[in-house]
Amino acid sequence: MKLLSSILSTVVLAPVARSLPEDAFPQQPLSEQTTGLANTISSQRDLEKVIDASPLLSFHRDIVQIESISGNEAAVGDYIVQFLQERRFAVTKQFLPREADKGSDDAVTAENGPQRFNIYAYPSWISEPKILLTSHVDTVPPFLPYSLSLPDDANGNSSSSSTWRERIRIAGRGTVDAKASVAAQVFAVLEHLEVDPMAPLGLLFVVGEEVSGEGMRWFADSDLNPTPPRLHTVIFGEPTEHALVAGHKGSLSLTVRARGKAAHSGYPWLGKSAVSAILPALARLDRLGDIPVDDGGLPGSKKLGKSTVNIGRMEGGVAGNVVPVSASAKLIVRLAHPDVELARQRIEEAVRETTGGDPDVEVEWNLYGNAPIEFDADVPGFNVTTVNYATDAFYLRFPTGNVKRYLYGPGSIFVAHGADEAITVGDLERAVEGYRRLIEAADRHA
Ligand SMILES: [Zn+2]
């Protein structure tokens, strides 16, 4: 556990009140917000009115409009901090040391930029949270502006106002991953507190999930996360299309490097091609997930299917007429089997066998690797699924104590990092209900 006293800044510790302040939840019931809207809509302004009329949709719009590509999360963080403080939450801005950025070569790290922080918050009138809802505020690049539209067929007379309202499409970077989860978690907590003001709920919004999980790793090792845990339930928010995720794959991250010797391309025998050296290894690694485990392939599992390999980036050589002196490739393996060590061995064997043990071709591990994660999926009324992407659940583990972990959220991972990232109003609102049902189940379980 790291000592955080110098970098922890407790922003507000409002006096403990025994009952819920009347002005804590200045939102209207949804039923009041939809009245007065026309049956059909004709303009962008009509769509904007729907968003304006809903505190949930407005909050979601506001946090999406603030760009927060990994490394640049401070502005959206400040917005959320203020929003929660106005609702009498005790909010801690948990600053990351600048060094935490250095573990990731993809992060946008401005040396003199705003310092990065996680947000840890709970109602100031409770003593401590036992049920934590958590997601991340960073997004992948590039920034895509917020926009509203309707599906083409939604504007006819056949659509009732409730139907078209739900089908309004909200597009932009982060609308799904993961600002939909952030917004739905905040409003699920606020709505639940209206019914049960003393519910022990907390919120954690971390930075850097899309790069290397530095925000969650920093939180997990901090004194905000004591051992043994005070929490009994953690609800992770990522796009799951409203299903409860029973497990997700693990991951391995590696670079394969080859060294060669430069020469004129007309006399290749005078040099050694690093590209020729690396190609057989990459060709085998590329399909290692499809090769049966008994034939030296990667292990899979019944629950999560096959392990898969992505060769995501390659470099090599300097010019067409020069024998390449170096080559490298970056790979991510999505691991469907808990034996991380076996998977690592299989990869190293594949490289050794295909290169005839060439000492100039090497595997460099970027992290040790993570085994698949199991989640609880025992709350009735949800679809249950598994996913192939990784989450911060790798880093927030509880070796002691009986802490339940759930993974649930609105929107689809299939659009999450794409140019068409978008969610519908209906899907976003439905997630508030989903989180509330998980909170209620956790409260009963306590
Ligand atoms: Zn995400």
Image: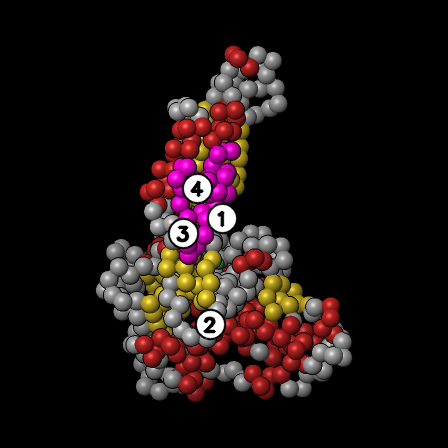
Q: CA distance from mark 3 to mark 2?
A: 23 Å
Q: Give residue 128's quadrant in the image.
A: bottom left
Disc 1 is placed on an element classified as loop
Is any atom of residue 31 visible in this view?
A: yes
Quick check: is the Cβ at mark 4 less than 8 Å away from ligand 1?
no
Q: CA distance from mark 1 to mark 4?
A: 39 Å
Pick whichever, 12 or 248, lies toward us: 248
Disc 3 is placed on an element classified as loop
Disc 1: CA contacts within 10 A as few (<14), some (14-19) or many (>=20)? some
Amino acid type, residue under disc 1 in the picture: Val
Q: Residue at x 37, y 42 (%)?
A: 343
**Residue picked out by circle 4:** 292
Q: Is residue 327 left or right of residue 202?
A: right
Pick whichever, 232 or 90, lies toward us: 232
Q: CA distance from mark 1 to mark 2?
A: 37 Å
Ranked by sequence position, the earlier of labels 4 and 2 is 4
**Residue picked out by circle 1:** 108
**Residue picked out by circle 3:** 301
Mark carried by residue 382: 2
- Mark in front: 1 vs 4: 4
- Mark in front: 3 vs 1: 3
